[in-house]
Amino acid sequence: MPEEVLFESENRQARAEIASYLRTVADKLDAGEPITLKAGDQTVTMEPPASPTFEVKAEREGPAGGPYELSIEFELEWDEGAGDGSDTGLEIE
């Protein structure tokens, strides 16, 4: 099945603003509450299960010889209507 983008937002922000968004997501996950994303006229509400798959990726992208773009990506994945995943032992320092 092809990928269907339900919501997308990308803009430059201060690290403190990004940290605030991540704290809100973390608080919602801790409380077991749905997460609602809003930007302009776009809105989507998602309800991660108790144990979704958590993917963390650090990348360097760009043409050979640079310039490169660095990124850190955090992704929660789960199958619609499926049960919980398992612990992978990730540490973030």
Image: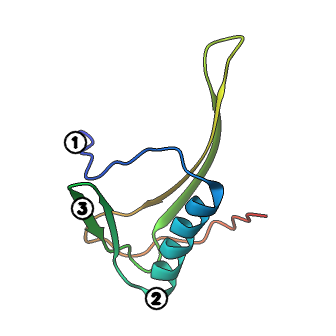
Q: In the depicted view, which residue is nearer to us: 7 or 82? A: 7
User: Nearer the observer, disc 1 or disc 2?
Assistant: 2
Q: What numbered label is drawn on residue 31?
A: 2
Which image quarter: residue 38? bottom left
Residue 40 x, y percent position in the rendering: 26, 54
In whole angstroms, how far apart are the C-alphas of marks 3 and 2? Answer: 21 Å
Mark 2: give few (<14), some (14-19) or many (20+) Cα within 10 Å: few
* Residue 15, above or below 69: below
Amino acid at the residue labelled 3: Thr
Q: Which residue is mark 1?
A: 1
In whole angstroms, how far apart are the C-alphas of marks 3 and 1? Answer: 23 Å
Mark 1: give few (<14), some (14-19) or many (20+) Cα within 10 Å: few
With 32 as the anchor, is 26 left or right in this view?
A: right
Q: In the depicted view, which residue is nearer to us: 84 or 4? A: 4
Amino acid at the residue labelled 2: Ala
Q: Residue at x 53, y 44 (%)?
A: 12
The colour mode here is: rainbow
* Residue 30, above or below 37: below
Q: Considering only order in the chain, which callout, 2 or 1, is on the residue closer to the N terminus?
A: 1
Query: Can you name the residue that lies furthest to the top here?
Result: 65
Q: Are marks 1 and 2 in contact (CB under 8 Å)?
A: no
Q: Which residue is mark 3?
A: 43
Disc 3 element: strand
Residue 53 x, y percent position in the rendering: 49, 64
Disc 1 element: loop
